[in-house]
Amino acid sequence: MQRLPSIDFLTIPVASVTMQQTVQAIDQCIQNDDHIQHVVINAGKVVAMQKDKKLYDSVVSCDLINADGQSIVWAARLLGKYLPERVAGIDLMENLIALTHRKGYKCFFFGAKEKVVRRVTAIYAEKYSPEIIAGYRNGYYTQDEEEAIARQISESGAHILFVAISSPKKEVFVNTHKEILSKVNFTMGVGGSFDVVAGITKRAPFWMQKTGLEWFFRFIQEPGRMWRRYLTGNYQFIKLVFKARLKKEQ
């Protein structure tokens, strides 16, 4: 892939690019029949990476790392680094599916519950064309099934793979089977994006996305499940950033 500008954010090489530049790089990769292993980071993932070496190694080994959360953009600037904007995973996915339709590429959708992933592929087939769908598979499987799933994806003819499985499972899956998946030009994790597309969960209003409050919108939808992740995780993230800032000033 073409070399993109990046910054060192808490030892993570994050691409300093816009959404448009990201999509252009991926399109060029597909045209050249290259391969990009992609990942996005947010505050929660950065915190998790501090204690989970397997997750850390899976993330930093990726060819392209985008800042999914607005908090990453702001924290980078606090540390004297520049990121032009966030490149949210769900927005990148939507842009790439539109690109797929324009250029005649194909996508494989992997993850979520069976009824959800089927709904997602039906929505995109109707909005664009059934021709963009290389295949789909739900995200419930045993470790013994992993290699067969990776081969199913590889042999589907997909140019792009979207993996809607939670961290760190999705990063580890893609990294573990990267040799098998090398026939797919672009692979990315999209978290809970399939649930949003299928109408199971709602995304925060645009103003909350721009002001860094998307996490709070999700928290108020599922407080029982999300309070520890966000309240504890956000505190740990702020601590990490300010520790790095103090070290930089010494």
Image: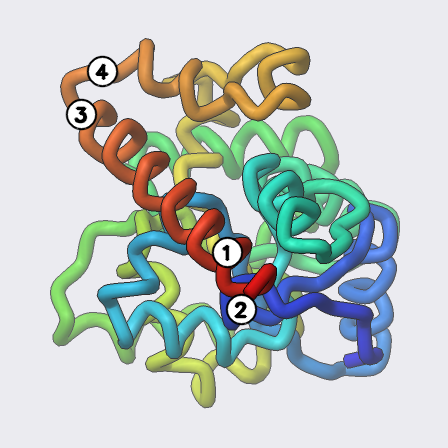
Cα distance between the residues tagged 3 and 1: 33 Å
The residue under label 1 is 246
Residue type at the position of mark 3: Arg
Front one among 102 and 39: 39
- Of all residues, the one furthest to the front in this rendering is 250
Q: Are marks 3 and 4 in contact (CB under 8 Å)?
A: yes
- Counting from the top left corner in percent of width and height, residue 23 is at 80, 54
- Mark 3 vs 1, N-terminal side: 3
The residue under label 4 is 223
- Counting from the top left corner in percent of width and height, residue 98 is at 77, 41
Cα distance between the residues tagged 2 and 4: 30 Å
- Mark 1 vs 4, N-terminal side: 4
- Counting from the top left corner in percent of width and height, residue 219 is at 32, 18
Residue at image point 52% right, 38% down:
121
Q: Is residue 211 above or below residue 179?
A: above
Q: Count neighbours of disc 3 (C-alpha within 10 A) and say few if under 14, some if 14 to 19, many if 20 or more.
A: few
Residue 209 horizontal side relative to residue 228, left or right? right
- Say which element carries label 2: strand
- Mark 2 vs 4, N-terminal side: 2
- Which of the 4 image quarters holds residue 3? bottom right
The residue under label 3 is 225
The residue under label 2 is 12
Residue 168 appears in the figure: yes
Cα distance between the residues tagged 1 and 2: 18 Å
